[in-house]
Amino acid sequence: MTVSFRELWTVLHGLVFGSLFLLAFAGGIAGLYSLRPEWVTVAGMRERLRRLLAGTWLMALVAWITVGSGTYIVYPWYRARDPESPRSLLLANPATALWHTFGMEWKEHVGWFAPILATAVAFLVAYYGAQIAEDSKLRKAAIWLFVLAFGAAAVAGIFGAFLNKVAPVR
């Protein structure tokens, strides 16, 4: 079995970077949800905040790497003006044209919400720190932003996986 350079970048973009973001979501959401003064000691709060701060910034960075590698490395190969490009193959067949006109268009736009929202969460954790634990509205806002980032990444990831199955980048 051989993997081309383009296939390697597709795997890095989706399976490695994208999966890292989606997997780290569970830890981040648990960290935000459990950040409550009545549940932890002062020392525990400091430790959780440090871990949450590092984790949210790392997740934001991974989200930016995922979207950046997809937009600037993999996507140009998908959209090449070559009749054998995945885009051309999808549009040439009426049965698969919807994968491009709906799936790819959604993927390339919705995917950008994930790093933007993940960065917003990381900023909230950095700026407000322990206040997130004390202010339930602020904590819930951060959780909702985090959930929306996860949803955007999940939509982009699902469409990406299906698109790569129907018309892989080679």
Image (tube, rainbow, N blue to C red):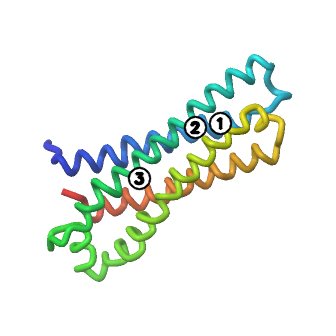
Q: Earlier in the sequence, mark 3 or mark 2?
A: 2
Q: Disc 3 marks which amino acid?
A: Val
**Res. 126 mark:** 1
Residue 38, relative to residue 1: is it above or below? above
Position of residue 147 measured from the top left corner of the image (x, y, whole percent) = 63, 51
Instruction: Please identify, in this view, whether the residue under mark 3 or under mark 1 is nearer the observer.
Output: 1
- Spatial CA span between label 3 and label 2: 16 Å
Position of residue 91 measured from the top left corner of the image (x, y, whole percent) = 27, 78
The image quadrant where one finds the C terminus is bottom left
Circle 1: is it few (<14), some (14-19), or many (20+) Cα within 10 Å? some
Task: Name the quadrant containing residue 99.
Answer: bottom left
Instruction: Determine the residue positioned at 36% across, 61% down.
Output: 162
Instruction: Determine the residue positioned at 40% across, 48% down.
Output: 66
Task: Name the quadrant containing residue 35.
Answer: top right
Q: Residue furthest front?
A: 127
**Dot 2 lies on which element?**
helix
**Res. 67 mark:** 3
- Spatial CA span between label 2 and label 1: 9 Å
Q: Disc 2 marks which amino acid?
A: Thr
Q: Which residue is mark 2?
A: 56
Name the residue nearer the viewer: 51 or 159: 51
Instruction: Determine the residue positioned at 56% across, 46% down.
Output: 119
Instruction: Please identify, in this view, whether the residue under mark 2 or under mark 1 is nearer the observer.
Output: 1
Residue 13, relative to residue 167: is it above or below? above
**Dot 1 lies on which element?**
helix
Q: Residue furthest bottom?
A: 94
- Spatial CA span between label 3 and label 1: 23 Å
Indicate left or right for 116 with 50 as reference.
left
Q: Earlier in the sequence, mark 2 or mark 1?
A: 2
Task: Name the quadrant containing residue 17.
Answer: top left
Instruction: Determine the residue positioned at 23% across, 61% down.
Output: 77
Q: Disc 1 marks which amino acid?
A: Ala
